[in-house]
């Protein structure tokens, strides 16, 4: 099994673990079995170790890529980060006018969406 194939399987397992832990934590928090702020916070944070694993696998994959693939991914990250900053700061000005704040989930969606756009744009430049 190649390193890339192994990392793909690891990533899939980490994503399944994340989804499973997220569903379990949501189910527990919907019930009344856990009382107190700290225990509830610990249950809410159950998916975080799987998220850390996902990040570690993504970094390992990035480091294993060749220079061209790294450049494509780095460009996508730049587009994603800078574009999300633009949206977040612009929305912050609108919040001053009474608009609702953007949640972290919305910001995350923008970040991922712009990464996909940046990746496709960057990869297309090298065809």
Image (cartoon, helix red, strand yellow):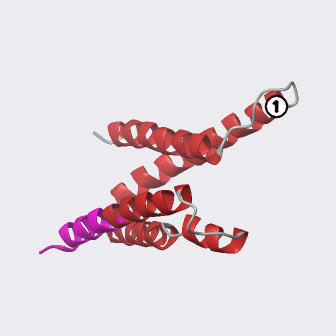
Region rendered in magenta: 1-14
Residue 104 magenta-highlighted: no
Q: Is residue 74 above or below residue 99?
A: below
Which part of the image, by quadrant, shows the N terminus?
Answer: bottom left
Relative to 43, residue 30 above or below = above
Give the quarter of the image for residue 102. Answer: top right
For residue 122, which quarter of the picture? top left
- In the orientation shown, which residue stands out farthest toward the left? 1
64 sits to left or right of 88: left
x, y percentage for residue 46?
Answer: 51, 70
Residue at 38% in and 70% down: 57
Q: Position of residue 117 (x, y in %)?
A: 44, 36
From the image, tell me which residue sits under label 1: 95
Q: What is the quadrant of residue 87 in the picture?
A: top right
Q: Nearer the viewer, residue 98 or 115?
A: 98
In the image, 127 versus 97, the foreground residue is 97
């Amino acid at each position: 099994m190649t390193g890339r194939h192994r990392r793909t399987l690891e990533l899939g397992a980490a994503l399944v673990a994340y989804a499973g832990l997220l569903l379990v934590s949501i189910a527990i928090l919907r019930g009344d079995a856990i009382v107190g702020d700290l225990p509830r916070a610990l249950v809410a944070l159950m998916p975080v170790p799987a998220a850390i694993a996902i990040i570690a696998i993504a970094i390992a994959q990035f480091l294993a890529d060749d220079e061209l693939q790294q450049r494509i991914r780095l460009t996508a990250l730049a587009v994603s980060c800078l574009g999300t900053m633009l949206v977040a700061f612009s929305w912050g000005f609108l919040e001053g006018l009474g608009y609702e704040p953007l949640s972290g989930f919305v910001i995350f969606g923008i970040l991922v969406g712009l990464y996909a756009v940046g990746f496709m744009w960057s990869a297309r430049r090298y065809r």
